[in-house]
Amino acid sequence: MANSPSGESVTERIVRVLETFDADRTVQTATEISRRARLPSSTGHRMVADLLECGLLERDEDQRVRLGMRLWELALRGSHALRLRQAALPLMERVQARLREHTQLAVLENDETLFIERLSHPHAGANITRIAGRLPLHASSSGLVLLAHSPEELRERILAGPLDAVAAGTETDPVRLRRELARIRREGVVVAPGSVESVSTGVAVPVREGRGPVIAALSVVLPRDAPTGLAVEELRAAAARISATMGTHRP
Protein backbone atom coordinates (compact mmCIF):
# COMPACT_ATOMS: atom_id res chain seq x y z
CA MET A 1 0.00 0.00 0.00
CA ALA A 2 1.24 3.48 -0.86
CA ASN A 3 2.37 5.67 1.98
CA SER A 4 0.85 9.00 2.98
CA PRO A 5 3.05 12.13 3.24
CA SER A 6 3.47 11.27 6.95
CA GLY A 7 4.95 7.88 6.05
CA GLU A 8 1.89 5.85 7.09
CA SER A 9 0.59 3.21 4.72
CA VAL A 10 -3.02 3.15 3.60
CA THR A 11 -3.41 -0.13 5.51
CA GLU A 12 -2.29 1.50 8.76
CA ARG A 13 -4.82 4.28 8.31
CA ILE A 14 -7.63 1.83 7.52
CA VAL A 15 -6.83 -0.07 10.72
CA ARG A 16 -6.93 3.18 12.68
CA VAL A 17 -10.36 3.95 11.24
CA LEU A 18 -11.72 0.51 12.15
CA GLU A 19 -10.20 0.69 15.63
CA THR A 20 -12.27 3.75 16.45
CA PHE A 21 -15.21 1.36 16.93
CA ASP A 22 -15.60 -0.65 20.11
CA ALA A 23 -18.32 -2.31 22.18
CA ASP A 24 -19.38 1.04 23.66
CA ARG A 25 -19.02 3.05 20.45
CA THR A 26 -20.79 1.13 17.70
CA VAL A 27 -21.93 4.09 15.55
CA GLN A 28 -20.18 7.33 14.67
CA THR A 29 -20.19 10.14 12.16
CA ALA A 30 -17.43 10.42 9.58
CA THR A 31 -16.18 13.53 11.40
CA GLU A 32 -15.93 11.65 14.71
CA ILE A 33 -14.10 8.79 13.00
CA SER A 34 -11.60 11.20 11.43
CA ARG A 35 -10.91 12.85 14.77
CA ARG A 36 -10.53 9.60 16.70
CA ALA A 37 -8.36 8.07 13.96
CA ARG A 38 -6.15 11.20 14.04
CA LEU A 39 -6.69 11.85 10.35
CA PRO A 40 -7.24 15.14 8.49
CA SER A 41 -10.96 15.63 7.98
CA SER A 42 -10.80 15.35 4.19
CA THR A 43 -8.71 12.17 4.39
CA GLY A 44 -10.98 10.61 7.00
CA HIS A 45 -14.16 11.38 5.05
CA ARG A 46 -12.62 9.96 1.85
CA MET A 47 -11.54 6.76 3.61
CA VAL A 48 -14.94 6.33 5.23
CA ALA A 49 -16.59 6.74 1.81
CA ASP A 50 -14.28 4.12 0.29
CA LEU A 51 -14.94 1.67 3.14
CA LEU A 52 -18.69 2.26 2.82
CA GLU A 53 -18.50 1.53 -0.90
CA CYS A 54 -16.78 -1.83 -0.38
CA GLY A 55 -19.02 -2.84 2.54
CA LEU A 56 -16.50 -2.80 5.37
CA LEU A 57 -18.54 0.03 6.86
CA GLU A 58 -22.27 0.71 6.48
CA ARG A 59 -24.76 3.41 7.42
CA ASP A 60 -27.59 3.01 9.93
CA GLU A 61 -31.07 4.49 9.63
CA ASP A 62 -29.78 7.82 10.96
CA GLN A 63 -26.97 7.90 8.38
CA ARG A 64 -24.32 7.31 11.01
CA VAL A 65 -21.54 4.84 10.29
CA ARG A 66 -21.03 1.39 11.79
CA LEU A 67 -18.96 -1.70 11.02
CA GLY A 68 -20.31 -3.54 8.00
CA MET A 69 -21.49 -7.12 7.68
CA ARG A 70 -18.92 -7.59 4.92
CA LEU A 71 -16.16 -7.13 7.51
CA TRP A 72 -17.76 -9.79 9.74
CA GLU A 73 -18.12 -12.15 6.76
CA LEU A 74 -14.49 -11.81 5.71
CA ALA A 75 -13.24 -12.19 9.28
CA LEU A 76 -14.96 -15.56 9.64
CA ARG A 77 -13.72 -17.12 6.41
CA GLY A 78 -11.17 -19.74 7.32
CA SER A 79 -10.77 -18.19 10.76
CA HIS A 80 -8.83 -20.23 13.29
CA ALA A 81 -10.84 -18.48 16.01
CA LEU A 82 -14.09 -19.64 14.40
CA ARG A 83 -12.88 -23.25 14.30
CA LEU A 84 -11.81 -22.98 17.94
CA ARG A 85 -15.19 -21.51 18.98
CA GLN A 86 -17.05 -24.26 17.11
CA ALA A 87 -15.01 -26.93 18.90
CA ALA A 88 -15.34 -25.24 22.28
CA LEU A 89 -19.00 -24.16 22.42
CA PRO A 90 -20.60 -27.57 23.13
CA LEU A 91 -18.11 -28.16 25.95
CA MET A 92 -18.51 -24.62 27.28
CA GLU A 93 -22.27 -25.18 27.38
CA ARG A 94 -21.72 -28.29 29.48
CA VAL A 95 -19.44 -26.42 31.90
CA GLN A 96 -21.84 -23.51 32.13
CA ALA A 97 -24.79 -25.83 32.76
CA ARG A 98 -22.93 -27.67 35.53
CA LEU A 99 -21.52 -24.60 37.27
CA ARG A 100 -24.18 -22.00 36.39
CA GLU A 101 -21.52 -19.29 36.22
CA HIS A 102 -19.71 -17.34 33.48
CA THR A 103 -17.71 -19.58 31.12
CA GLN A 104 -15.17 -17.94 28.80
CA LEU A 105 -12.76 -18.74 25.98
CA ALA A 106 -9.75 -16.49 25.39
CA VAL A 107 -6.74 -16.35 23.09
CA LEU A 108 -3.48 -14.43 23.00
CA GLU A 109 -3.65 -11.53 20.56
CA ASN A 110 -1.26 -8.62 20.25
CA ASP A 111 0.18 -9.14 23.77
CA GLU A 112 -3.29 -9.09 25.35
CA THR A 113 -6.00 -11.52 26.41
CA LEU A 114 -8.77 -11.45 23.81
CA PHE A 115 -12.07 -13.10 24.80
CA ILE A 116 -13.67 -14.75 21.77
CA GLU A 117 -16.62 -16.46 23.47
CA ARG A 118 -18.57 -16.18 26.71
CA LEU A 119 -21.61 -17.93 28.15
CA SER A 120 -23.39 -16.59 31.21
CA HIS A 121 -26.09 -17.79 33.58
CA PRO A 122 -28.79 -15.24 34.54
CA HIS A 123 -27.86 -15.57 38.21
CA ALA A 124 -24.08 -15.59 37.76
CA GLY A 125 -22.00 -13.04 39.64
CA ALA A 126 -20.07 -10.00 38.47
CA ASN A 127 -17.93 -10.18 35.35
CA ILE A 128 -16.53 -7.27 33.32
CA THR A 129 -15.29 -9.31 30.37
CA ARG A 130 -17.23 -9.47 27.10
CA ILE A 131 -16.85 -11.10 23.69
CA ALA A 132 -14.14 -9.23 21.75
CA GLY A 133 -13.08 -7.60 25.02
CA ARG A 134 -9.46 -7.46 26.13
CA LEU A 135 -7.54 -7.55 29.40
CA PRO A 136 -3.82 -7.34 30.19
CA LEU A 137 -2.19 -10.77 30.20
CA HIS A 138 -1.17 -10.61 33.86
CA ALA A 139 -4.58 -9.50 35.10
CA SER A 140 -6.93 -12.49 34.71
CA SER A 141 -6.89 -16.25 35.11
CA SER A 142 -7.18 -16.70 31.34
CA GLY A 143 -4.38 -14.23 30.71
CA LEU A 144 -2.10 -15.94 33.21
CA VAL A 145 -2.59 -19.27 31.43
CA LEU A 146 -1.77 -17.67 28.08
CA LEU A 147 1.20 -15.77 29.47
CA ALA A 148 2.62 -18.84 31.19
CA HIS A 149 2.63 -20.75 27.89
CA SER A 150 3.69 -17.85 25.67
CA PRO A 151 7.13 -17.54 24.04
CA GLU A 152 9.87 -16.54 26.48
CA GLU A 153 10.49 -13.24 24.70
CA LEU A 154 6.86 -12.20 25.24
CA ARG A 155 6.90 -13.28 28.89
CA GLU A 156 10.03 -11.26 29.57
CA ARG A 157 8.57 -8.21 27.87
CA ILE A 158 5.40 -8.41 29.99
CA LEU A 159 7.37 -9.05 33.18
CA ALA A 160 9.48 -5.96 32.46
CA GLY A 161 6.30 -3.96 32.98
CA PRO A 162 4.44 -1.90 33.56
CA LEU A 163 2.23 -4.38 35.45
CA ASP A 164 -0.78 -2.22 36.23
CA ALA A 165 -3.41 -3.38 38.72
CA VAL A 166 -6.90 -3.98 37.35
CA ALA A 167 -8.16 -4.80 40.87
CA ALA A 168 -6.70 -5.19 44.35
CA GLY A 169 -5.90 -8.85 43.69
CA THR A 170 -3.99 -8.32 40.44
CA GLU A 171 -0.42 -9.57 40.80
CA THR A 172 1.91 -6.68 39.92
CA ASP A 173 5.18 -7.90 41.46
CA PRO A 174 7.34 -9.38 38.66
CA VAL A 175 9.21 -11.76 40.97
CA ARG A 176 6.04 -13.31 42.36
CA LEU A 177 4.46 -13.31 38.91
CA ARG A 178 7.42 -15.18 37.42
CA ARG A 179 7.08 -17.86 40.12
CA GLU A 180 3.35 -18.11 39.49
CA LEU A 181 3.86 -18.56 35.74
CA ALA A 182 6.30 -21.41 36.37
CA ARG A 183 3.76 -23.07 38.68
CA ILE A 184 1.03 -22.71 36.05
CA ARG A 185 3.20 -24.47 33.47
CA ARG A 186 3.77 -27.34 35.93
CA GLU A 187 0.25 -27.70 37.28
CA GLY A 188 -1.91 -26.55 34.36
CA VAL A 189 -4.44 -24.49 36.32
CA VAL A 190 -4.93 -20.94 37.61
CA VAL A 191 -7.09 -19.87 40.53
CA ALA A 192 -7.00 -16.07 40.74
CA PRO A 193 -9.18 -14.49 43.45
CA GLY A 194 -9.84 -10.80 43.04
CA SER A 195 -7.51 -10.33 40.07
CA VAL A 196 -10.14 -8.59 37.90
CA GLU A 197 -12.93 -7.84 40.39
CA SER A 198 -12.73 -8.04 44.16
CA VAL A 199 -15.94 -10.09 44.40
CA SER A 200 -14.89 -12.78 41.91
CA THR A 201 -12.40 -15.62 41.45
CA GLY A 202 -11.21 -16.63 38.00
CA VAL A 203 -10.33 -20.27 37.33
CA ALA A 204 -8.64 -21.19 34.04
CA VAL A 205 -6.91 -24.07 32.26
CA PRO A 206 -5.05 -24.31 28.94
CA VAL A 207 -6.49 -25.56 25.66
CA ARG A 208 -4.02 -27.13 23.24
CA GLU A 209 -3.96 -28.00 19.55
CA GLY A 210 -4.08 -31.73 20.12
CA ARG A 211 -0.98 -32.47 22.15
CA GLY A 212 0.78 -29.44 20.76
CA PRO A 213 1.07 -25.83 21.90
CA VAL A 214 -1.43 -23.97 24.03
CA ILE A 215 -3.80 -22.04 21.77
CA ALA A 216 -6.42 -20.76 24.22
CA ALA A 217 -7.55 -20.56 27.81
CA LEU A 218 -10.87 -21.88 29.09
CA SER A 219 -12.11 -20.23 32.26
CA VAL A 220 -14.99 -19.66 34.62
CA VAL A 221 -15.71 -16.71 36.91
CA LEU A 222 -16.96 -17.73 40.35
CA PRO A 223 -18.07 -15.76 43.40
CA ARG A 224 -15.00 -14.83 45.44
CA ASP A 225 -15.43 -17.41 48.22
CA ALA A 226 -16.96 -20.24 46.16
CA PRO A 227 -15.24 -23.65 46.19
CA THR A 228 -13.11 -24.17 43.07
CA GLY A 229 -12.64 -27.94 42.99
CA LEU A 230 -15.61 -28.74 40.75
CA ALA A 231 -14.73 -25.87 38.43
CA VAL A 232 -11.19 -27.17 37.96
CA GLU A 233 -12.50 -30.67 37.29
CA GLU A 234 -15.07 -29.50 34.74
CA LEU A 235 -12.66 -27.16 32.99
CA ARG A 236 -9.94 -29.79 32.67
CA ALA A 237 -12.37 -32.34 31.22
CA ALA A 238 -13.76 -29.80 28.73
CA ALA A 239 -10.32 -28.49 27.73
CA ALA A 240 -9.08 -32.04 27.08
CA ARG A 241 -11.96 -32.70 24.69
CA ILE A 242 -11.57 -29.33 22.94
CA SER A 243 -7.84 -29.99 22.55
CA ALA A 244 -8.52 -33.42 21.05
CA THR A 245 -10.98 -31.94 18.58
CA MET A 246 -8.55 -29.19 17.55
CA GLY A 247 -5.80 -31.75 17.05
CA THR A 248 -7.98 -33.99 14.90
CA HIS A 249 -9.55 -31.41 12.61
CA ARG A 250 -6.57 -29.40 11.46
CA PRO A 251 -7.01 -27.42 8.25
Image (cartoon, rainbow, N blue to C red):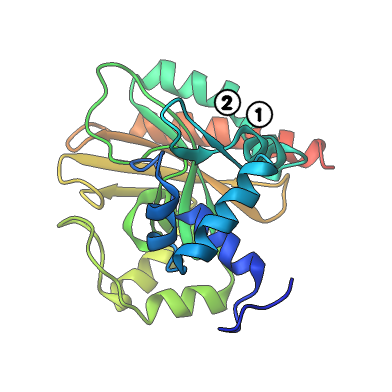
The amino acid on which the numbered mark 2 sits, given as a three-letter code, is Leu
Task: Give the farthest residue toward the right.
Answer: 251
Residue at figure coordinates x 28%, y 33% from the top left: 222
Quarter of the image that includes the N terminus = bottom right
Q: Position of residue 214 (x, y in %)?
A: 62, 53
Res 162 visible:
yes
Front-most of residues 240 and 194: 194
Front-most of residues 134 and 105: 134
Q: Secondary structure at mark 1?
A: helix
Say above or below: 87 vs 53: above
Quarter of the image that includes the C terminus = top right
Badge 1 crowding class, 10 Å Cα cut-off, few under 14, some 14 to 19, many 20 or more, is: some
Q: Position of residue 197 (x, y in %)?
A: 20, 46
List the residue tagged with mark 2.
89
- Looking at the image, do the residues carrying marks 2 and 1 touch, with CB atoms under 8 Å apart? yes
Residue 102 image-quadrant placement: top left
List the residue tagged with mark 1.
86
Residue 43 image-quadrant placement: bottom right
The amino acid on which the numbered mark 1 sits, given as a three-letter code, is Gln
Front-most of residues 94 and 234: 94
Q: Secondary structure at mark 2?
A: helix
Q: Position of residue 72 (x, y in %)?
A: 63, 37
Residue at figure coordinates x 46%, y 24% from the top left: 95
Badge 2 crowding class, 10 Å Cα cut-off, few under 14, some 14 to 19, many 20 or more, is: some
Res 148 visible:
no
Front-most of residues 62 and 11: 62
Residue at figure coordinates x 59%, y 60% from the top left: 14
Which disc number belongs to residue 13? Answer: none
- 62 relative position to 199: left or right: right
Residue at figure coordinates x 26%, y 41% from the top left: 201
